[in-house]
Amino acid sequence: MDLKREFEKYGFEKILDYIYRNPHKNLPLIMDFIDYMSQGTFPEHRKLARQAIEKEDDPYHYYIDHIIKDVDPELAKHLMANLTVNAGINGSQKRNLLKRQYHYPVPWVMSLLYSDLETMDDLVRQGEALAIYIYLIEDLPLAHQEDFITLTHNHPQSVFLLFTDGQLVNEQMIKSTLRTRNIIYTLTKPNIEKMAFLKERRMLYGIDVPSFTKDLLDEYRTMGIYFLWYHSPSLEHFRLLSKYRINEPLFIIDEDFDIDLLENPHGNIQTYIENGRIEYMKKRSQKKPTSL
């Protein structure tokens, strides 16, 4: 067990408890704690986050308020702690150490096609040892719902983005989400009924979309969606998306340009990454924009 990480995550959650007592007054304290933990890393990200928290005219001030008011508080606090402390600050520091040690980058997100529980549990365990704490779960059969719940229970320090057409959006999954507090729903189809179901139960959820426009962004916000999952077809299109993100208070995640993703590994993950490092680094250099 990483005692430093556990201590900082505990401290972060306690700060969040205090913030929820009076969000308008206490929310800036979260950035003081993040600044302390980050030790100078992520300066631009921290600057933007502080601006969104402290300036009421910032477009993302609404977004933060939306999360605090409309997501179940215990779910929101645990997700924020996992994403900020485990996947973000401490995870980044460990991945950088591993990069210097092994001379290849360790992705910070892993995509998994669901198989059996034993295999999935082993892959997540290996991933966490490499400071990977975000997992995209795809093609989960309804019959394996219980196994998936067990998986999320076994790994409370990680976050699982469950991609589903809506079949897995049911009362049993909601109860499990409120218990494990580490599941985020991503609908692969914009199902109005399922979105209303998730909104009513105060889940954190988004949709996987093939395209969007300014009008659609406005429509999605009225539905209570927290993020869009997207695939830019080109660097030029990603630049346009980046301009939208500046002023549109809806989190848009581009899988191809935003995320260092390890897709569907098998066997020994460290060996899998090492063997594919040349192709992986070539792929990232082709996708990664130098500036926006």
Image (tube, rainbow, N blue to C red):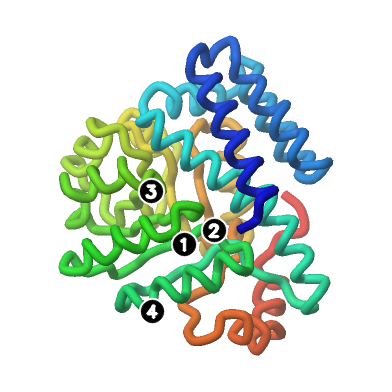
Amino acid at dot 1: Tyr
Q: Name the N-terminal-most of marks 1 and 4.
A: 4
Cα–Cα gap, marks 2 and 4: 17 Å
Q: Mark 4 and mark 3 in contact? Answer it, CB < 8 Å.
A: no
Amino acid at dot 3: Ile
Disc 2 element: loop
Disc 3 element: strand
Cα–Cα gap, marks 2 and 3: 13 Å
Q: Mark 1 and mark 4 in contact? Answer it, CB < 8 Å.
A: no
Q: Residues within 10 Å of mark 4 (few under 14, many from 20)?
A: few
Q: How many marks?
A: 4
Q: Position of residue 176 (x, y in %)?
A: 26, 48
Please give left or right for residue 147 compared with residue 6 in the image.
left
Q: Residues within 10 Å of mark 2 (few under 14, many from 20)?
A: many
| Residue that appears at 60% across and 53% down | 87
Q: Name the N-terminal-most of marks 2 and 3.
A: 2
**Which residue matches tag 4?**
119
Cα–Cα gap, marks 3 and 1: 10 Å
Please give left or right for residue 73 compared with residue 14 in the image.
left
**Which residue matches tag 2?**
133
Cα–Cα gap, marks 2 and 1: 7 Å
Q: Residues within 10 Å of mark 3 (few under 14, many from 20)?
A: some
Q: Position of residue 6 (x, y in %)?
A: 61, 47
Please give left or right for residue 292 compared with residue 199 in the image.
right
Q: Name the N-terminal-most of marks 3 and 1.
A: 1
**Which residue matches tag 1?**
135
Cα–Cα gap, marks 1 and 4: 14 Å
Q: In what quadrant of the picture does the N terminus appear?
A: bottom right
Amino acid at dot 2: Tyr
**Which residue matches tag 3?**
184
